[in-house]
Image (cartoon, grey):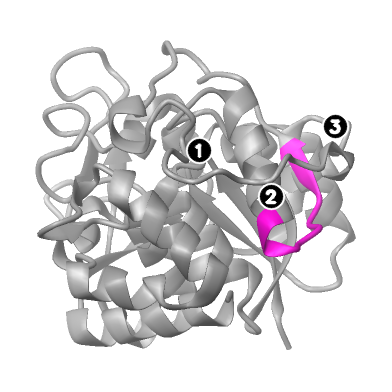
Amino acid sequence: MARPVIISTDPGIDDAVAISILLFSKKVDVKLIAAAAGNVGIDQTLINVLKLEQFLGQSIPVVKGVSRAIIKEPVHAYNVHGKSGLDGYEFPEPDHSLVINQTAPEAIHEVVSHSNEKVTLVGIAPLTDYAMFIRLYPEDLQNVEELVMMGGCIGRGNYGVLSEFNIAGDPEAAKIVFESGLKIRVAPLELGMQARIKPNISKKIKTYGRVGDMFYSLFSKYRGGSFKTGLKIYDALAAGILLNPDMFTFEKTHVEIVNQEGFTYGASLMDFKNRLHLSENALIGKSVDVDQFVKWFVEAIKQAC
């Protein structure tokens, strides 16, 4: 039976890939998509989710997330995804009738509290909406199976010296999530660096009808890596951990989010050698079988075509 899933996302080209894979997987049943502020502003990410659903012929309820981080100023990644977040393709006009008139924490609460099965949370954006859900509805956590997320880094960051974009987008929210007691599985920055989508794979995807052409057009504008030498489709790794975990090797550890101002603000310190002597709170994907991932990636996109 397909497990119920909520997605928090800030499309974002790699988000669009992960969303499409999850929407067409028979292993999950997406109940709600929360548009989060991140790669672009909240109004644009909401439009992007709706446009993508319209294009894919889907009608999953959508909620507009919190407009900014709990404390820090908003971040963005226009230089990676373009001004719209999905530069490179002309999508159909969005269907705003899918938007729920609630806050994201309220909408998440409605799904989780009324589900007959434990719900899996997927986080491929800054974690603000999930953090506020945790704070407002702690009684719901018993009905959450796990959180599967893309975020954090084992070593150097892609936003700050030691911070990855999704965690750096709202370190205070990330700290709440990692201290929540939820079961957490993480696709860190390094997995995306390992499993690059090479030009021959992009060309193969282009042959998969209108959906393949859409992704190829987005990939040609995406600046997460290089279209010519290999793209880092980070958020697809989170989808992979959820749907096909055998591709990965994992290690349990304690993750500490730094939320003090300075060079380490937003860092996700992963204590693999247990120097802090703190309890393990996450399962980290440390490596991926690249050939297996690429094969899975292509087949997963093909299902959406």
> Cβ–Cβ below 8 Å for labels 2 and 1?
no
Residue toward you, 160 or 203? 203
Task: Point out the image quarter for the N terminus.
Answer: bottom right
Q: Is residue 152 left or right of residue 123?
A: left
Point out the stretch of residues depicted in magenta: 55-63
The amino acid at mark 2 is Ile
Q: Is residue 174 left or right of residue 112?
A: left
Residue drawn at point x = 11 percent, y = 29 percent = 161
Residue at numbered disc 1: 127
Expressed as whole percent of the image width and height from the top left, the position of residue 49 reads 64, 44
- N-terminal of the two: label 3 or label 1? 3
Alpha carbon distance from label 3 to label 1: 18 Å
The relative height of residue 105 versus residue 282 in the rendered view (above or below) is above
Residue drawn at point x = 19 percent, y = 37 percent = 158
The amino acid at mark 1 is Leu
The amino acid at mark 3 is Gln
Task: Point out the image quarter for the C terminus.
Answer: bottom right
Q: Quadrant of residue 260?
A: top left
**How crowded is the residue under tag 2: few (<14 C-alpha within 10 Å), some, or many (20+)?**
many
Residue at numbered disc 2: 33
